[in-house]
Amino acid sequence: MKTFHEVTAGQPARVLAVLAEDGAPVEYGQPLFTLGLRTEG
């Protein structure tokens, strides 16, 4: 079963890395992404 949930950040950020493989099962609390602060300019 696939579910999609919107994720919001408290400040501007960008995804630096996707840590979960496509289609792989994930556990509650498992990191899925590495985020970095977005810098302007």
Image (tube, grey):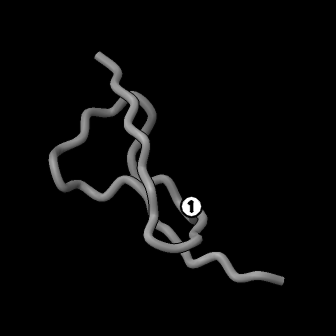
Count the marks: 1
31 horizontally vs 15: left or right: left
Q: Amino acid at mark 1?
A: Val
Q: Name above or below for residue 4 compared with residue 37.
A: above
Nearest the eye: 26 or 38 = 38
- Look at the image and tell me in which quarter the C terminus lies: bottom right
What residue do we see at 44% from left, 70% from top? 10
Q: Name above or below for residue 41 compared with residue 26.
A: below
What residue do we see at 33% from left, 33% from top? 24
The percent coordinates of residue 34 (x first, y second) are 46, 66
Give the quadrant of residue 9: bottom left
Q: Name above or below for residue 30 compared with residue 4.
A: below
33 horizontally vs 27: left or right: right
The residue identified by callout 1 is: 15
Residue that protrudes farthest toward the right in the picture: 41
Give the quadrant of residue 4: top left
Nearest the eye: 1 or 11 = 11
The percent coordinates of residue 28 (x first, y second) are 15, 47
What residue do we see at 30% from left, 58% from top? 31
Q: Name above or below for residue 11 compared with residue 23.
A: below
Secondary structure beneath dot 1 equals: strand
Count residues near mark 1 (Cα–Cα under 10 Å), then give few for <14, some for 14-19, many for 20+. Answer: few
What residue do we see at 65% from left, 76% from top? 38
3 horizontally vs 37: left or right: left
- Look at the image and tell me in which quarter the N terminus lies: top left
